[in-house]
Image (tube, grey):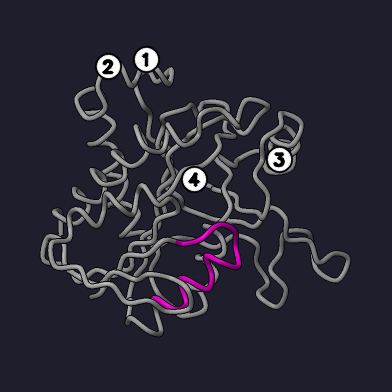
Amino acid sequence: MRLALIAAMREELSAVLARMPDEQRQRVAGRDFWVGHWHGHEIVAVLSGIGKVAAATTATLAIHRFGAQAVLFTGVAGGLGPDVRVGDLVVARELLQHDMDASPIFPRHELPLYGLSRLRTDATMSQRLLAAARAVAAEASGLLGADTLATFGIGTPAVHEGLILSGDRFVSTSAESAALRRELPDALAVEMEGAAVAQVCHDHGLPLAVLRIISDRADDHAGGDFTAFVQAVASRYSVALLDRYLAAG
């Protein structure tokens, strides 16, 4: 089974490619797709692009041009749940487009003509990803180093599973995040691509798993040193998680 590894950030993709000794680049529709192997698995690795349309296009190309039969998406997100902190890991069980609103024709958040608003990830893949996330969180101090944990205010990372929101805006004010919590109180995190990839996988009947690393609290301080977090924390987390995930099966 060929697995598409879709990374939201360039630093994550670079870390993945370092583990694929035989990767071959193919450029399609302005995107670089890297085909190779990791732990004996056939892999196509690619950068998602930012936003729902870019991510959906990337996932569709991975399926149709490169024969992906399953998708695993990694990236960063803003924390929404009350117990979700910077440095935590969130495995999606459901994804929803928080900015989808075709009312009054359809209920708010419902995908027109789908009859649902929440798209579920694959249970088997997600459980395996959850196990990998827990193992990596337990080793965070050795993986990242005490100085890095202190720099970003990361204590003991927690692993969460549940609802992740996606929308075409970077949620970076306390007012926006509070509004999302009121409207969707079980949401754990918010980002800009996952639910679009979930819709593509739903349409094709393919399994999907999504892992997000919490880089901020989606509040007035969300702008922070985002690039530094991705380089020092997210990219290391992602490659360690994927390494464990693929080695397990």
Q: Are marks 3 and 2 in contact (CB under 8 Å)?
A: no
SS class of the residue under badge 3?
A: helix
User: How dense is the environment of label 2, judged by Cα within 10 Å: few (below 14), some, or many (20 and up)?
Assistant: few
Magenta span contains residue 59: yes
Q: Which residue sits furthest right?
A: 104
Q: Which residue corresponds to the image point at 14% horizontal and 68% vertical from the top-left?
A: 22
Vertical position of residue 59 compared to residue 16: above or below: below
Q: Which residue is mark 3?
A: 180
Q: Disc 1 residue type?
A: Ala
Q: Which residue is mark 2?
A: 146
Q: Which residue is mark 1?
A: 150
Q: Nearer the viewer, residue 106 or 6?
A: 6
Q: Are marks 2 and 1 in contact (CB under 8 Å)?
A: yes
SS class of the residue under badge 2?
A: helix
Q: Which residue corresponds to the image point at 41% horizontal and 84% vertical from the top-left?
A: 64
Image quadrant where residue 179 sits: top right
SS class of the residue under badge 1?
A: helix
